[in-house]
Image: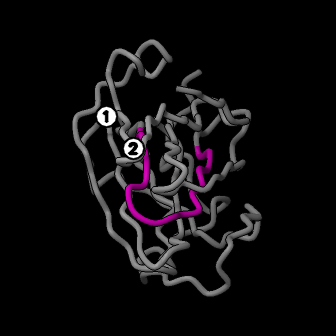
Amino acid sequence: MDIEQTKIDGARIIKPDVFGDERGWFMEPYQTQRYFEAGITDEFVQDNLSHSKGGVLRGFHYQFNNPQSQLIYVSLGEIFFVLLDVRRGSPTFGEWVSTTLSADNYQQFYMTPGLASAFCVMSESANVHYKVNRLYEPSVEGGVLWSDPALGVDWPLEDPIVIKRDAGLPKLADISDDRLPPHRP
């Protein structure tokens, strides 16, 4: 397993070992001891799975109280995945990192609590898996407008499918500090 630390503390791209032969391939998307040895010590309490059709864009989403760490990977299709640092007081506040996650590249993205995530589907459809360390609490959900011009995210789709809720999210500069998660170095 290879792990690449991104410019945002707590955001890592993970490349699990994949073993293939003429029958196909085998991999372990998660194994507690191996991830603990790599410094990912979260106790994941829930697995989530979303299915989206091509052209869908979801996010940016986060929880400002009770922030979650997540381990994300794709088992069908391909997505352009973006993490945004929304932790107040973080040296990389407002910065983002991206990668392509797909069923073909087997990559995963780990995000520490306090980061916001978004993705757009680049294939006909995609299944996105999320392991989370805390249960979802709708009352503390926050979000940032996916197209906030101050962020400068270079989305690979010109006219994505975005639900009304996500299209109405505020720009990062318009979110009050009490609705942003804290930075915990």
Q: In this image, 63 relative to 138: left or right?
A: right
Above or below for 138 versus 1: below
Q: Amino acid at mark 1?
A: Asn
Q: Residue at x 59, y 46 (%)?
A: 86
| Neighbourhood count class around disc 2 (C-alpha, 10 Å): few under 14, some 14–19, many 20 upward | few
Which residue does the numbered mark 1 point to in the structure image?
A: 133
* Residue 59: % across, % down: 49, 65
- Front disc: 2 or 1: 2
Give the secondary structure at mark 2: strand
Q: Nearer the viewer, residue 129 or 17?
A: 17
Q: Is residue 78 magenta?
A: yes
* Residue 151: % across, % down: 73, 61
Kindly report the secondary structure that dominates the magenta region of the rendered protein.
strand
Q: Residue at x 45, y 66 (%)?
A: 77
Query: Which of pointers 2 and 1 lies earlier in the amino acid sequence?
Result: 2
| Neighbourhood count class around disc 1 (C-alpha, 10 Å): few under 14, some 14–19, many 20 upward | many
Which residue does the numbered mark 2 point to in the structure image?
A: 25
Q: Are marks 2 and 1 in contact (CB under 8 Å)?
A: no
Query: What's the colour scheme?
Result: one colour
Above or below for 1 versus 78: above
CA gap between label 2 and label 1 equals 28 Å
Q: Residue at x 38, y 73 (%)?
A: 52
What are the residue bounds of the magenta stretch?
70-86
* Residue 121: % across, % down: 51, 71
* Residue 170: % across, % down: 56, 68
Q: Is residue 59 magenta?
A: no
The extreme bottom residue here reads 159
Quarter of the picture containing the C terminus is top right
